[in-house]
Structures are given as C-alpha cells and as structure tokens.
Image: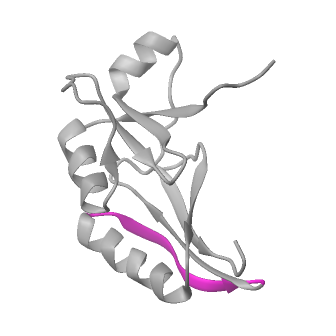
Amino acid sequence: MKTKRIWANLAVSDLKRTRDFYTTLGFTVSGSEESKELVSFSFGENNFIINFFLKHIIESNAKLKFSDLQSDNEIIFSISADSKKEVNAWKEQVIQAGGKVFAEPYEIGEGYTFGFSDPDHHKFNVLYWPGM
C-alpha cells in the first residue's frame, strides 16, 4: 500500500486557546472554514497537518477515550531548528505563548534540544542537529 498523506488528530479543551497558542508560535491555520469542533494547523515545509479536536468530539467520533496528558503521554512531536540560538529563541516564544517547558535546553550528542507542552499538555521538542 502507498500512503498518500498522514496527519495527526489530538484532543483539546479550548479551541480559541489552541488557535492563539499555535498562531503565536507562527504556525499556519490549515483550511479556511471556521469550525466549532476543530482547528487545524500546517507544520513544516511538508505541511504536516495536526487537527486539534475538542476532546468530547474526537472521543465520540473515534469511539475511544484519550489519555489524561497531565499524568500520561501520547507522543512527542519533534520540530527542527537551524541552530542552538534558534532552539533558545523557540523556548522564549513558547513561554510567551503560554506553553510549559518540561525540559530545559541541553546538549544531546552533537545536537541541542529542549521540550515543551502546549496548554493541553501535548508534548514537543525543538531539536538542532548539525547537518539535519
């Protein structure tokens, strides 16, 4: 089988807060229609789409319960950076947007990274790796 496209669907409690957080970080809203059920964003040069659904909607549609991200984890998305300086700039922007840093910037092999969560506790890390 050939996969044409892949995207992620995540649960959130507040669409406006989610939209504000990700637009403050500079991500592009995907799609032109306003929805009372979800907001979608395009990430990166390949336009990876993450749909943020209201939790009760996605649980009803998917017929399953989503994790409590304050105590559990589902996935960590990685965002590439071009330099250590850019990693540090991401950290400051995440804090200004209302995100929470769960791992301060640190060296990892030849690279440099830090971890953060959005207001609904979805986890990301921003990683600089030479030559990537």
From the top left corner, tell me how far across and down residue 90 is, in percent. 41, 75
Way the structure is coloured: one colour
Q: Which of 106 and 90 is in front in this view?
A: 90
* Residue range of the region highlighted in magenta in the rendering: 98-109
* Picture quarter with the N terminus: top right
Where residue 81 sits, quadrant-wise, is: bottom right
The residue drawn where x is 36% and y is 27% is 55
Residue at the farthest right position? 1
**Where residue 21 sits: x, y (%)?**
27, 55
Left or right side of 32 for 118: right
Answer above or below: position of 100 versus 22.
Answer: below
Position of 111 compared to 105: left or right? right
- x 34%, y 63%: residue: 99
Query: Which residue: 38% across, 55% down?
Result: 118
87 is higher (above) or lower (below) than 122? below
> Residue drawn 34% across and 54% down?
27
Left or right side of 33 for 125: right
Identify the main secondary structure in magenta.
strand
Q: Is 119 in front, or is 89?
A: 89
Image location of residue 57, percent across then percent down? 35, 18
Image coordinates for residue 39, horizontal then vertical, percent: 30, 34
Quadrant of image for the C terminus:
bottom right
Q: Report the number of numbered marks.
A: 0
Decide whether residue 99 is among the magenta residues: yes
Q: Does the magenta stretch include residue 88?
A: no
